[in-house]
Image: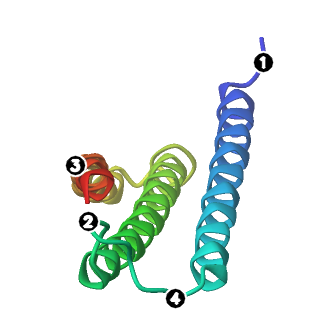
Amino acid sequence: MSDPRNAAHDKKVSHDKKHQEEAEANKAEANKAEAASEAAPETEPAPGGPSPEAIAVHEGSLAVLTQVKDMEFHSRANLERLSTLMLTVEDELKQKAFAASLGELFSAQDVVQTQLTAFITAYQAECETI
């Protein structure tokens, strides 16, 4: 039988790779949006078009959304690190009391991760309506 730690490590490596690719895609998307906004000439809006204030609010909202998505990415990385540390402390070092403390930290970080994901979904929908 193969060692379950090897399987867990392989899963973690593939998970990290996937999330790094997502982060790079998000950065590329943000850079593309930033380049498009810089390249767009500043002209007077057509009558009935969005006002400059509305455009500024939309751009500010997109900037906030990008920052929150970055926080969510780092939150996910923290979850992964905490789970690795928890396994190390519990299985390799046999320090059950500290593993329980790390488990509580993991639970708290999971709550933050869940709330960030819910916020991103709601805020993204709001940004699309602006």
35 in relation to 70, above or below:
below
Q: Which is nearer the eye, 1 or 116? A: 116
Viewer-nearest of labels 1 and 2?
Answer: 2
Amino acid at dot 3? Ala
Q: Which of disc 2 and disc 1 is earlier in sequence?
A: 1
| Residue for point 21% across, 52% down | 115
For the residues marked 1 and 3, what is the alpha-carbon distance in whole angstroms? Answer: 43 Å
Quadrant housing residue 105: bottom left
For the residue marked with disc 1, what is the amino acid? Answer: Ser
Name the quarter where the N terminus is drawn.
top right
Q: Amino acid at mark 4?
A: Glu
Within 10 Å of disc 2 (Cα), the crowding (few <14, some 14-19, many 20+) is few
Out of 61 and 105, give the one closest to the viewer.
61
Mark 1 and mark 2: span between their CA atoms? Answer: 66 Å
Q: Where is mark 2, residue-wise?
A: 48
Residue 59, percent from left and from top: 39, 76
Residue drawn at point x = 67 percent, y = 81 percent:
39
Q: Which residue lies under the disc numbered 3?
A: 122
* C-alpha span from label 4 to label 1: 62 Å
Q: Quadrant of the C terminus?
A: bottom left
Q: Which residue is mark 4?
A: 42
Q: For mark 1, give the secondary structure.
A: loop
User: Can you say whether 118 is above or below 66 in the image?
Assistant: above
Report how far apart the C-alphas of labels 4 and 3 lie in the structure: 30 Å
Say which residue label 1 marks. 2
Q: Position of residue 54 (x, y in %)?
A: 26, 75
| Quadrant of residue 28 within the rendered picture | bottom right
Q: Residue at x 64, y 33 (%)?
A: 8
